Image (cartoon, rainbow, N blue to C red):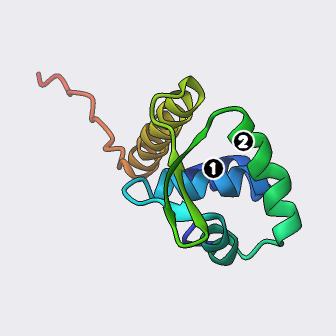
Amino acid sequence: MEDETILIETFGHSPVIRIVDFFLDNPLSDYSREEVIRDLGISKITFYKYFQLLEKNGLFKRTRQVGKATMYRLDEKNEVVKALKSLVWTLGIKAMERVIEESSVSVPVRKSVKRK
């Protein structure tokens, strides 16, 4: 896919990666679980199975209630979240380095010729 993030491109489309990637890619807002399910297009059963595991490990924090919906965002203070953000940053740098390396044009250097 052309719109894949570096995290999905590197680690694939597993539900855990997709859920984490969604929140990493949208850090400025909070989201209800239903919004994430709808945006990712995964089943509720699959989503809840993995979201509960991630929430239990402290990756998300509850930010507010909107009606009956609880809103979530990544917990920026969580060490795992910090490590994931660092990983994404490093993967991005490595990807840029590869692009630069692949697009570099090598110019042959001529040997100097001694004149008599």
31 lies left or right of 51: left
* Residue where numbered disc 2 is placed: 54
Which of discs 1 and 2 lies nearer the camera? The answer is 2
The numbered mark, 1 or 2, whose residue comes first in the sequence reads 1
As helix, strand or loop, the secondary structure at mark 2 comes to helix
As helix, strand or loop, the secondary structure at mark 1 comes to helix
Q: Position of residue 53 (x, y in %)?
A: 79, 41
Contact (Cβ within 8 Å) of mark 1 with mark 2: yes
- Residue 20 marker: 1
Asked if one can make out residue 5 in the rendered structure from this viewpoint, the answer is no
The amino acid type of the residue labelled 1 equals Val
Asked if one can make out residue 92 in the rendered structure from this viewpoint, the answer is yes
Q: Say which of 37 and 61 sits in front.
A: 61
Give the residue drawn at x 33%, y 41%. 108
Q: Quadrant of the C terminus?
A: top left
- Residue 35 marker: none
Q: Position of residue 83 (x, y in %)?
A: 54, 27
Q: Say which of 4 and 50 sits in front.
A: 50
Disc 1: CA contacts within 10 A as few (<14), some (14-19) or many (>=20): many
Task: Point out the residue furthest to the left here.
Answer: 116
Q: Quadrant of the N terminus?
A: bottom right
Q: Position of residue 111 (x, y in %)?
A: 27, 29
Give the residue drawn at x 42%, y 53%. 27
Give the residue drawn at x 83%, y 72%. 43
89 lies left or right of 43: left
Label 1, label 2: how many angstroms apart (C-alpha)? 9 Å
Q: Say which of 14 and 98 sits in front.
A: 14
Give the residue drawn at x 20%, y 27%. 112
The amino acid type of the residue labelled 2 equals Leu
**In the depicted structure, whether residue 20 falls above or below residue 46:** above
